[in-house]
Amino acid sequence: MRLDIEFVFEGFRIMRKRPWAVAEWGLVFLVANLIGFGSFAALAIPAFIQMSNLSGTPDPAVLAGLFGSLILPYFILFIVMILAGAMVSCAIFRTTLSDDKPGFGYLRLGGDEIRWILSHIVHALLFFAVYAAFAVVGVALGFVFRLIDENLFGLGIFLAVVLGFGVTVWLMIRLSLFSAQSFAEKRINLFGSWKLTKGNVWMLLGGYLLAGLLAVVVETVVMTVVWFFLAIFMVANMGALQTLGSAPGTPDLAAIAWMVGPMIAGYVAVFSLVAWPVMTAIMVGAPAAAYRTLNGARAGAVEKVF
């Protein structure tokens, strides 16, 4: 089955038909950021402060202890954001590929989300193996070229990098429907999309590039608005910031946090509630719609958006 470029705009179709669901996905991202970055700030900032206060040659044991204390906050942040991504991505799949009852934004936390996480872990390991293989090939080519001429070692590395990049992009496109297909089939299926994407590589490549461009446009618009208001906030509080900066002795971290905190909170809130759900709808909706079309499931649901 041939694919139409209309699959790129699935995210906009979702936003038009299910705006309340997109808003609820924003709440998920907001809660995830509050938990993830909140715990990170509470657990990691003291370690960063201790590092900044170290003078002279620090004791390696002390440094190791401080770096070790950062493992837990990073782990919590990673787990929370992975869960949020899994929940929202599967919610997008439900709006596109199934007739499940909406509930709260089509959101669940169950087998679909666990499969999403596991399939992405396996997918990441697969491409790590591909990168490692091309690294070995690059070194081997470099030494082969070096036998011909010592100045050609870099050329061998360069050719391997170019070849590896091209093969990796091609593989990513051929396997790009694995997440949607695993959701639809209720089992992890990494290579099932190989058959579905046959003959549609260029359309998928162009569509994914267009979807990425649209997501960047959304991010740029949101960032422009956010930075405009942040600039107004900075100008309004310039005097207080200058006073804090020129104060003698150790900076008052509590006062700095009181000044900067609202800016960071506003930035995180806007991105969580607006940018991330919209960008996720665009980037996840595109392969979901492509899978729906190429698999022949609910083909009638594909409609013109613009």
Image (cartoon, rainbow, N blue to C red):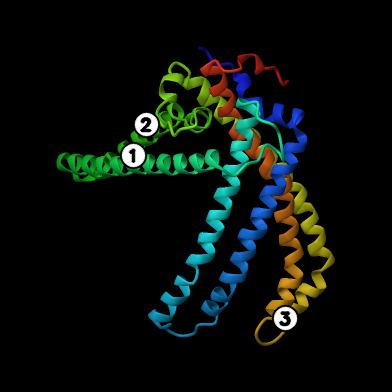
Q: Where does residue 71 sit, x and y in percent of width and height?
A: 48, 66
Q: Name above or below for residue 241 compared with residue 141.
A: below
Which residue is the extreme one toward the bottom?
Answer: 249
Query: Label 2: which residue?
Result: 167
Q: Name above or below for residue 213 compared with residue 264.
A: above
Query: Label 1: which residue?
Result: 130
Q: Name above or below for residue 75 compared with residue 156.
A: below
Residue 71 is marked as none
Residue under the image location 50 percent in, 68 percent down: 70
Whichever of callouts 3 and 1 sits on the residue coming sooner in the sequence is 1
Whichever of callouts 2 and 3 sits on the residue coming sooner in the sequence is 2
Q: Nearer the viewer, residue 101 or 124?
A: 101
156 to the left or right of 17: left
User: For the residues marked 2 and 3, what is the alpha-carbon distance in whole angstroms?
Assistant: 55 Å
Q: Where does residue 231 sit, x and y in percent of width and height?
A: 78, 58
- SS assignment at label 2: helix
Query: Label 3: which residue?
Result: 246
Q: Nearer the viewer, residue 250 or 121?
A: 121
Residue under the image location 27 percent in, 41 percent down: 138
Query: What is the quadrant of residue 208 in the picture?
Result: top right
- SS assignment at label 1: helix
Residue under the image location 55 percent in, 49 percent down: 82
